Amino acid sequence: MNSIVFSVLLIIIGLIVGVGISFIINLVRGNIASKKADSIINYAKKEADKIKRDSILEQKEEIHRLKMDLDKEIKEKKSEIKDQEERLMQRENNMDKRDELYQKREQTLDQREQALNEKLNDIQNEKSKVEEIKKEQLDLLEKISGFSKEKAKDLVMKQVKENMTKEISEYIREQENEAKLTADKTAKEMLVTSMQKYAADIASDQTVTVVELPNDEMKGRIIGREGRNIRTIEAITGVDLIIDDTPEAVVLSSFDPLRREIAYVTLQTLIKDGRIHPTRIEELYDKVCKDMKQKIIEYGNDATFELGLTKFDPELIEIIGKLHFRTSYGQNALQHSIEVANLSGLIAAELGENVMLAKRAGLLHDIGKAIDHEIEGSHVEIGVDIAKKFKEDDVVINSIASHHGDTKADSIIAVIVAIADALSASRPGARNDSLENYIQRLTQLEEVGNSIQGVEKAYAVQAGRELRVIVKPEEVDDLEAHKIARDVKEKIEESMKYPGTIKITVVRETRAQEEAK
């Protein structure tokens, strides 16, 4: 029994001890947790205070930065406002000055107007006095001359009528001459027929080219509807087309060989192509002109190759080739130059001189004739300028300048070239003086037409019996075209001497062209 009680007591004591220990442990743990919690709270308070201080500093810095930016912006705005105020002040000052200037001008204008009114009054007074004096002088003149105003007017009208009658008489005489020319046509045709055997090698070769046609129907296509095709060909080429009863043939007539050759090739190409209309004619003409330049260069190269000469500028080669289409008293200028070059070389070889230099001088002695119809001056002056331009030898330049005796010959080669030129020109059949005069007259006739203001180009056709003048439609109207015809007629009568009559035809053509795309 005592043991049980003892055991119970032990148990109770153990429980009490356990509870006490647990209480003590819990108490200790509570103190530790409380201390830890206090530590955490203190740390959190410190961190919060730190974050608060940092935030306050950042806010202060941001406020300071914003304040600086705002101050800067305010200063800029103030500066802009100040500039604007200064500009406005300047503008206001300028306006004030301008206003003052306008006021002064207005005062000056008023003064001028007043002065002009006074002068106008003076002029009117003077005019009245002049009219009175004029009337007095007219009365005095009538009294002295014994003619009244109406009688003097009748006398002037009578004089004008007499002048017009004289002009009408001249016109009638011109028509009579033309009729006589027509009447003599048959006799002249007989003479020409008898001369053909002699002149065919000269005149036909140098003024006429025959184009063979595949059939006679082609003549109608060349003429075109209402003659528009043949008019276009004659207008752009400057060559006269003669379509007569000769079967399957068309004759091209022109004193300019180059112009005639271009027209010949253009017409041949049109016939082969089959499309004959004004637009196609102009296209082919432009193409043939470009191809003809290459052909001219070939003539120049052939001439230098034949003579064994080298080192020519390509532009000079082209000028040499143009000599093929020029004549001198009926003699082909390029053939004449080659002949002079060969003769000069032969004579130079006999005398022991430089053969190549002599040939070069002989070939170039008439080089000015290639472009003397394009540039003002004699062919000698033009030739010297060309030789200097292409830096030819001084001997060559002197040979060109002295071959007609205009300048003293400074070398033996220059004398040789002059001798060779005389030999080539004087050989039998080399030249035809009448043909040269004929060509010069036609050239002069075209120059007269081209010298008139508003003329685009002029062509001498019908062997010089007609001058076809093409005017610029945008500059010349229909009434002005009649005046140009009369001006050309008067200028021809004053400056030229010619047989028979010359018909002046002024052509004014306006085209409207668009391209559909």
Image: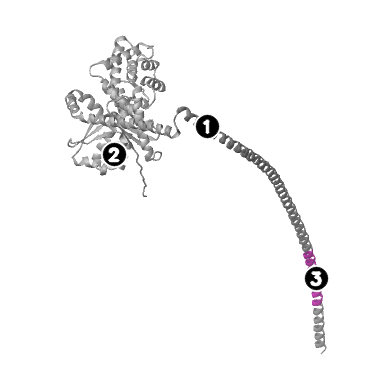
**Amino acid on which disc 2 is placed:** Arg
Q: Which residue is under mark 1?
A: 136
Which residue is at a point 32% across and 34% down the rendered structure image?
A: 289
Q: Earlier in the sequence, mark 3 or mark 2?
A: 3
How many other residues sit within 10 Å of disc 1, few (<14), some (14-19) or many (≥20)?
A: few
Q: Is residue 471 something that shows in the picture?
A: no
How many other residues sit within 10 Å of disc 3, few (<14), some (14-19) or many (≥20)?
A: few
* Residue 57 percent coordinates (x, y): 77, 57
Tell me the distance, in whole angstroms, between the alpha carbons under discs 1 and 2.
Answer: 63 Å
User: Is 193 drawn above or below residue 268 in the view shown?
Assistant: above
* Residue 78 percent coordinates (x, y): 73, 50
Q: Is residue 469 left or right of residue 116?
A: left
Q: Quadrant of residue 388?
A: top left
Q: Are marks 3 and 1 in contact (CB under 8 Å)?
A: no
Q: Which residue is under mark 2?
A: 231
Q: Which mark is residue 34?
A: 3
**Amino acid on which disc 1 is placed:** Glu
